[in-house]
Image: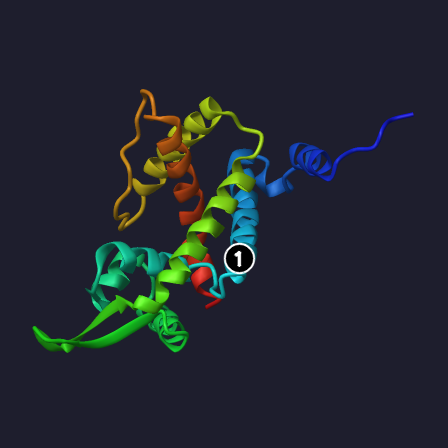
Amino acid sequence: MPGPHHPEESAERAARTEAPPSAARCGPLSHALSRVARLHRIAAGRFLKEAGIYPGQEFVMMHLWDAGPVRQSELIKVLDLDPSTVTKMLQRLEQTGHVRRSPDPADRRAVLVEATTASCSLHTQVTGAWSRLEEQTLAGLDAHERAELARLLGKVEANLCKEAQDCPGAPAAQDGAAGTAQDSAADAAQDSASSARSTSAAEL
């Protein structure tokens, strides 16, 4: 009589055995990537909800925390999203007290966006959410596997960027080692999450 199975084992077995739709059988890896991106987006949403923000908004805050005040037009370019979507995101973040918008002293027609002092607590929450997302995403993978996954995702992203009209900040594909395991694991999380950025923002 077979013993009980853990939910994690059942989920992993189901993911391995799920056959792609007939139209996707010529692209099984692409189908798998789409499933992973969807599940990663769902997990991110669950963790970020506890911080009071939606998936996609954390990328706005991450940029503002690191870059300081930036023009809204620059933020739109960095996020690679529709201007109306970014405007809506900023309105919500402004309402919750996380960002401040003001006229640019150098050009009154431009708008400066910056993170507020009150957003420091959100920084801590987002860091924790991102750490939990990383561990859930990469659970069961050792340091070597995480580094290899980061290297392969970098090559996949580089392949896709060749056909993209604009792919800012895309890492160059590397055939050698991917650096330290810690840095590579962080890159893997960023690469995986970036695929959810545009799709998640449509919900904001």
- Given residues 146 and 22, the one toward you in this image is 146
Report x, y in % for residue 163.
31, 43
Give the residue type at disc 1.
Answer: Gly
Residue 99, compared with residue 146, is above or below; it is below
Residue beneath the point at 41% across and 74% down: 96
Kindly state the secondary structure of the residue where label 1 is placed: helix
- Given residues 10 and 83, the one toward you in this image is 10
Report x, y in % for residue 103.
17, 78
Residue beneath the point at 45% across and 56% down: 125
Q: Quadrant of the N terminus?
A: top right
**Which residue in the rendered view is the most extreme toward the top?**
176
Left or right: 165 in relation to 45: left
- Given residues 48 and 71, the one toward you in this image is 48
**Circle 1 Cα neighbour tier, 10 Å, few/some/many (<14 / 14–19 / ≥20):** some
Left or right: 15 in relation to 151: right
- Given residues 55 and 28, the one toward you in this image is 55
Report x, y in % for residue 35.
57, 44
Left or right: 111 in relation to 164: left
Residue beneath the point at 44% across and 43% down: 192
Residue beneath the point at 28% across and 60% down: 64
Residue linked to disc 1 = 45
